[in-house]
Amino acid sequence: MKSGLIMIAAACLLAVFAPLARPQEQAPAGFAFPDLPYTYYALEPWIDARTMEIHYSRHHRGYYDNFIKAIAGTDYERQTMPQIFAGISKAPAAVRNMGGGYYNHNLFWENLAPTPEAPSDVLRGALEARFGSMEAFQAAFNQAAAAVFGSGWAWLVLTSDGKLEITATANQDNPLMDVAAVRGAPLLALDVWEHAYYLKHQNKRADYIAAFWKVVNWPEVSRRYTVALDAGKK
Ligand code: MN3
C-alpha cells in the first residue's frame, strides 16, 4: 500500500517535471526559443492567425530544435549567434540553415507589431537621405522582396561603413553571415518564404508585402538602428 502511494507520488513528480526535459530547457545559455511578443491573431487582418500559429509553433520551432541538435557537443554552443554567422562558410549546412531559421524569425517577430507607430526622426531622416523618401525606400524594399527567387528574406541593414542598404538573402541566410553579398546589422527583416503567406495570399507575394507594411514595428527598427550606429562608433 505504502509503496503504491510512493509510486503514485513519483508518477506525479515525473508529470510535473517532464516538460523540463524538452530541448528548449536543455539548450545552452544564450539560445532560447522566444515567446511570440503578441497573440496569433494580433496582426489580423494583415497577417492571419492560422499562418502565425503554423509559422511560429511549427516552422520556427522546427528550426530551433534542429539548430540545438546541430550544435550539441560542439564549440558552437559557446558562441553567440553573430559569432557563429561570422564564420558560417565553414559551418555544417544544418548550422547555417537551422541557425539562420532560428535567428531570422526571432528578428522577424520582433519587427512586427499590431499597432502602427512611426519610425524615429533619426531613422526617418536617414532613410530619406539615403533613398529620397520613405515611399522610395519602401518601393525599393518591395522590389528586393519581390525579386527573391524561391525562398528567402529581404532586409534593411546598416553596413559596417555606416550605410543603410536594402538586400536579400536566399533560404535562411542573413546579412550577419560571411557568405552574404551585403553584410551589416539587420534592422528590418521580411520573410518571403511561401510558408509566410501562402494560406492567405497563395501565389500573390506582392499582396503579402503590402500587408507587411501595415504591421512593421517601427520603434523596434528605430531601436536597432540606434544600437547599430552606436556599435559602429566603438
Ligand atoms: Mn519563415
Image: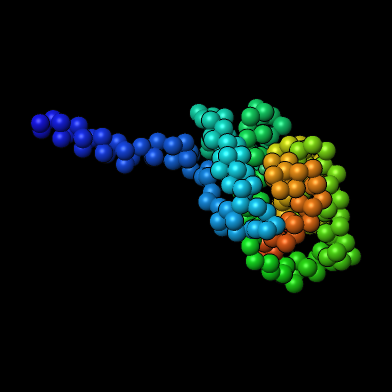
Q: Position of residue 156 (x, y in %)?
A: 77, 54
| Picture layout, residue 175 above or below residue 44 | above
Q: Give residue 10's position: percent from left, percent from top.
A: 23, 35
Q: Is residue 231 visible?
A: no
178 vs 109: above or below: above
Q: Is residue 88 left or right of residue 37?
A: right
| Quadrant location of the N terminus in the rendered image | top left
How many callouts does the rendering have? Answer: 0
Residue at 47 percent across and 36 percent down: it is: 23
Ligand 1 location (quadrant): top right
Where does residue 65 sit, x and y in percent of width and height? 54, 35
Q: Nearer the viewer, residue 57 or 232?
A: 57
Does residue 92 appear anywhere in the picture? yes
Compared across the picture, whether 175 is left or right of 220 comes to right
Specify the quadrant that holds the C terminus.
bottom right
- Among the 4 quarters of the image, the one containing residue 177: top right
Please tell me which residue is depicted at 83% across the width and 65% down the height of the picture.
Answer: 134
**5 versus 217 height, above or below:** above
The quarter of the picture where residue 15 lies is top left
Specify the color scheme: rainbow
Q: Position of residue 161 (x, y in %)?
A: 80, 54
Q: Residue farthest to the left?
A: 1
Residue drawn where x is 76% and y is 51% of the image: 208
Residue at image location 73% in from the left, 41% down from the top: 194
